[in-house]
Image (spheres, coloured by chain):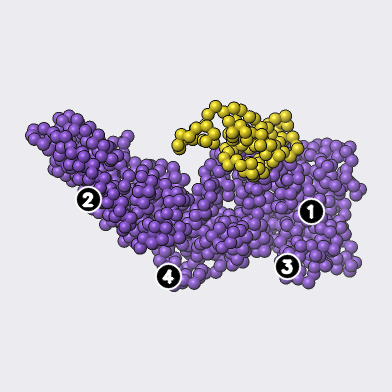
Amino acid sequence: MTKIEAIIQTSRFESVKDALKEAGIEGMTVSEVRGHGRQKGHTEVYRGREYSMDLLPRTKVELVVADRLVETVVEAILKSARTGKIGDGKIFLSKIDEAIRIRNEERGENAL
Amino acid sequence: MTNAPPLDSLRAACVAGREALRREFQARGDALATLAARSALADRTLAALAASLFPASPPQAARYSLVAIGGYGRSALFPCSDLDVLLLCADARAAETASAPGAALVRALWDLGWRAAVTSRLLDECDRFEQDNPEFTISLLDSRYVAGDAALAAALRQKILPALAARERTALVRSLAEITRERHEKHGNTLFHLEPNLKDAPGGLRDFDVACWATALRELALRRAWTAPESGWSAMLGESAGAAYRFIAAARVFLHFHNGRDDNRLTYDLQEEAAAAGIGTAATQAVPVDQWMRSYFRHARAILRLESRAMDEAGSRQSLYNAFEEWRARLSNSDFSVHHNRVFCQRPAALADPAFLLGLYEFVARHGIEPAVDTEASVERVLAGPAYATGWPGEPAAAGASLRGILTRTGAGVALRAMHRVGLLDAVLPEFRAVDSLVIRDLYHRYTVDEHTLLAIEALHALRVSKFEPDRRFAEILAEVEQPDLLYFSLLLHDVGKGMPGDDHVTASVEAAGRACARLGLSGYERDLVIFLIRSHLEMSLTLQRRDIFDPDAVRVFSELVAVPERLKMLCLLTYADIRSVNPEALTPWKAEMLWQLYAAAANHLARSVDGARIAAGAASDRELIEVVRGSSALASLAKPLAAFLDGFPRRYLKLHASDEIALHFEMAHRLEERLVAGETLAAEAQLRERRGHYEVTVVARDRPRLFAGLTGALSAWGMNILKADAFSNRSGLVLDTFVFADLYNTLTLNPEERGRLLGDMEDAAAGRRASDAAPRHRRAPHGPRARSRSTVATQVRMDNQCSAASTVLELVAHDRPGLLHLISELLADAGCNIEAALIDTQGEKAIDVFYLTRKGAKLGDAEADTLLETLLHGLEQP
């Protein structure tokens, strides 16, 4: 099993969600996050006052999938999250040792 | 001697008894019978266990008593509720003897499937109010003898508790109020949850208990005797709360049987099942789930009213509150009085007058104090009368004005809830009836639609005092809104479409709002604004979610939708309130920051794109223009000449002014043309009107150098402080300037005849008959913070040659002071600049001005812009 964490533009979340659904992925965890990569922050001057936003708002999508689905899922995220501009985000993959469904204690891929 | 209890036979009896309870409830749906039967089953079990476990022979016998307390004591034992038992001992020796049997009793009860808690106390200990455990003393109010020494239990009931209640009434009631307040707060202080907790939420069964306890404490203190709580309530309150108790108790019994545990959350699934089974209804027949939930909310409201009344009468607001209450009592006037923090009507008969009736709620909104239960009863009687049978009997426009007044008061939430509770809000605004207690199932909303709406209105009012850091910026925006009443009014109606047929609630809300605006006498401009806000109320959220708000194109598209800064401010606040009232966690700092960033980017875009889109020649068929013509009868046959007048104006002009205002401007332009054709070369037209506590002067003239400086100079010479202004010109060189100004010295208010002279001066200045640099009659204001306070706003000047295709954009922020705009416009005129468009605004002590400048018909060169920037900075530094 592999955990996929995708930090994406909030505006692309609906597309990513649809793409994941199309790829057969039903469950995911979504959080509001802030951060920046190379593009740094954003500054807005309003009414003569400068408002700096060092950390930009992004959306984090987390899901754990069977290893055989990883490439499909990654491909789906890449296609749906990409705008081609700086700040499109990142995908991180990491190995998962075990998954347990709390309701019935199913384990492994059955618990996903 | 003690014996081993007959656990097997008791277990069989308990299992059979519980099964019988379930069958009986399913067959008859009688919750009270179920509660009593389960209590009786517990009594029998407890008595049997006591007979086996406790010594039956002297000297230890009969020196203890088993007393049911809490819900069990009330014989209101729900199927999965805990069994609370008091092991009451006459003295320490009896307690020592009863200790081991008591422990065995608890084990046996658990073995038999009862979730039992046995508390041991000496009789004397029950005579003390346990301040750190007030729940225990309160639970004794429900004490009921079950087994053991009956005289001991009677001593508790007849001697100890009445004396304790009389002695500690104030502390007990205050503790009860505090516990209740904390419980309500935990549930968001509202009964309108989409998935309510039937026991603990406001209006739940616990509030019925609170009402019983409060009444019992009052009666015990007064009479030292037990009376049935119902005898202490008014018939109306008692009957409606009794019916409410039966309904909600039935729902809770249903939940317990369904869940198999003490889980009191009425989930969506269980709402469906309960409605399908007709739980709580007399016929136990299926009813539509929305109708069943509306019954639930109506009943919960009845219980909450009973609780509120009972606590008031028990004196829940004593001591520390007294001083405050006494102070508030001074708010009383000849129509309404404030007593014990409740509003009473001095002349109940006058409530038949619709204006007086609304006046009551204006008073409530102004002071944020609830009407008394008796006052509400009077209002309900009036509303149930024949005068209201066919709709609002008063003048609708007056009712609209009152409602808008209520909406802007800080206690609007209190007043609106009180109006909604008795049906008055529906009477004034029938459109709101569609969302009364309406449950719309979704994963994010926690409240019914009406509650969500009222919370949204309260969220905006709360901005003024919020300590939440992200709120500060939104509070500033709210302070700038010119007509907050329209914002609140839009919020009130933004979701009413959810209770109307069709899938598109926005369209249904817009249509309903259109009807309400027409009926309540809103002007065309006000109606357009309300309709815009409701139609667009999801747009800002959608942009946040689905667009990159740092992408200039996304900002441009959104800005074009709102078109004018005032609409942007209102839409931003409406969005803020709408999200905030979805559930307590919905508006995260993350979302608030996103919302504010989009607002700021759109505000900047609007300021920098005034001349980007202009009305074209031959625009008679333009959709927006057609709407303008439709909106004013004076323009009905004038589409073509109007299009010629507007040719070259920024499109924003159409959004800034209502049709009747545009008709007025067109008429002024027409008169000016006639005068010019007649040979009056130095002609100009000016009009003055009062506008929301300030004055607005509109000037139409032929463009010429120093025109704007001349007009600002004339106003400064009169000592007027310009708060807002906009200046536009059309393609034929006609200038339309509008100034909103504060009459700092009340010159025009105290001397109405001076208005004509001021208009004359404005026309002279516009026509060039008066020098633009005429020395302003600077009179330092004897009062007023602006004149006195030291400058706290740093002067900032920014020149932008990129954002406009035809002009150099000058953005200027400075500390506001009388004559400032005149000074700036003089400096610009001295530099040879022509003002193509101007947007002037004042927020508190800050002047925020945007000018679109050309020089000799073109943008300023970079060097010219730099020089002008230096000139302005230097000039503005002068005192």
Q: Which residue is mark 4?
A: B385
Marks 2 & 4, CB-CB < 8 Å contact: no
In the drawing, what numbered circle is on residue B727?
A: 1
The residue depicted at 68 percent of the width and 50 percent of the height is B568
Determine the residue located farthest toward the right in the rendered image: B856
**Dot 3 alpha-carbon crowd within 10 angstroms: few under 14, some 14 to 19, many 20 or more:** some
Position of B805 relative to A106 (above/below): below
For the residues tagged 2 and 1, is the chain the same? Answer: yes
Q: Which chain is yellow?
A: A
Q: Secondary structure at mark 1?
A: strand
- Mark 3 and mark 1: Cα distance apart in space: 25 Å
For the residues tagged 3 and 1, is the chain the same? Answer: yes
Chain letter of disc 2?
B
Viewer can see residue B871: no
Q: Which residue is mark 3?
A: B630
* Percent coordinates x, y for residue B812 in the rendering: 76, 42
Q: Reading the chain from its start, which is encountered first: label 3 or label 1?
A: 3
Q: Is residue B662 left or right of residue B89?
A: right
The residue depicted at 76 percent of the width and 65 percent of the height is B626
Q: Reading the chain from its start, which is encountered first: label 2 or label 1?
A: 2
